[in-house]
Every structure is written in structure tokens, then in C-alpha cells.
Amino acid sequence: MPVETINGHRVLEAVNAALDRHGASREELIPILNQVNQALGYLPAEALSEISLRLKEPLSSVLGVASFYSMLSTRPRGRHVVQFCESAPCHVAGGREVWETLREALKLATDETSPDGKWTLITASCLGICGVEPVVIIDDDVYGNLTADKIPEILARYS
């Protein structure tokens, strides 16, 4: 079977590097998936199958973990990933208006990537930063105490 190439990285090389670093044990599944996800930009089916085989874990189990965590993706994502917290505290603190402004500005629905590959918009049930709600994380940058009027300025930083 040919080895797929994604984002200049060979899938098998990314899996091997993660297994070399973390070991081939079930206990290391999340760090392995995270490293492969970072190397490739997402977790393609070929990578999940190889990890399943090498860890001797059912593919359904590996896919279940890969699809559970918002930091991981089984589909390609944009250059900039926008995570919006949809928890009750964020919602009560004005999150609905922030969410609507994000959706309108990016012209995306939940879990969509823009056609140009620049943006992916995802939601999380909790980002764990409830003291500064509503919260949005873009790539590794955290924006708290948001109001809808701050969204255009924040998004402009990523052009």
C-alpha cells in the first residue's frame, strides 16, 4: 500500500516518530495522536489505521479517542483554528452574540473549514477558562471577556 503524503510529511514517518517518542502502549494513545495531528495537520484514516495496528487496539477505539478531543481532528483544518466555548457560563456572559458574529465574519458553520483553507470554526463544551468568559481560542491565542464588537479586530490579526 502506498504511503500518503500530507503537508509535506509522510504519514508513516509521522506515526513512527510519535511511537518512537511515546512508545507503543495504549496509555500513550492521546500523546501519540496529538503528535501525529500536529505533524500532519489532522489525523488521516491511514494514520489511525497504522496506530491501531501498532498499538494492537481496535480501530474503533482509536477513532473514538481521535474524535472525542477538540484538539484533534480527523479532517483537514484551516491554517487558523477558531475554537469557541459554548458552555453555559460563556453563553450567559454574552457568548451567543460573539458566536453569531464569528459565524457571520467567517461565513462558516460549526466544524467547517473555509474554501481557501484559512479558517476552521469549531466549538468546545468547555475550554476551562470560565473566569474570563466568553472565550475564543485562535490557534494558541486566548481571547477572553469578549464582546461581539471585538471580533473583527481580532480576526484581522490573522490575515
Image (cartoon, helix red, strand yellow):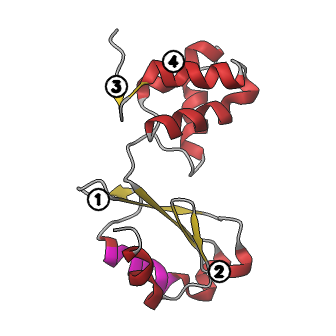
Cα distance between the residues tagged 2 and 4? 39 Å
User: Identity of the amino acid at label 1?
Assistant: Ser
What is the three-letter code of the residue carrying label 2? Glu
Q: CA distance from mark 1 to mark 2?
A: 26 Å
Q: Which residue is mark 1?
A: 114
Left or right, 130 with reference to 60: right
Question: Pointer 1 and pointer 2: residues touching (CB < 8 Å)?
Answer: no
Of callouts 4 and 3, which one flags the residue occurring earlier in the amino acid sequence? 3
User: Residue 13: where, in percent of width, then height?
Assistant: 48, 20
Q: Amino acid at mark 4?
A: Glu
In this image, 64 relative to 120: left or right? right
Q: Residues within 10 Å of mark 4 (few under 14, many from 20)?
A: some
Name the spot of residue 33 as percent of width and height, x first. Answer: 59, 33
First in sequence: mark 4 vs mark 1: 4
Q: Secondary structure at mark 4?
A: helix
Q: Earlier in the sequence, mark 1 or mark 2?
A: 1
Q: Which residue is mark 4?
A: 50
Mark 3 Cα-neighbour bin, 10 Å: few <14, some 14–19, many ≥20: few
Nearer to us of marks 3 and 1 is: 3
Examine the rendering and report whether any part of residue 51 can be seen.
no
> Mark 2 or 4 closer to N-term?
4
Mark toward the start of the polypeptide (3 vs 1): 3
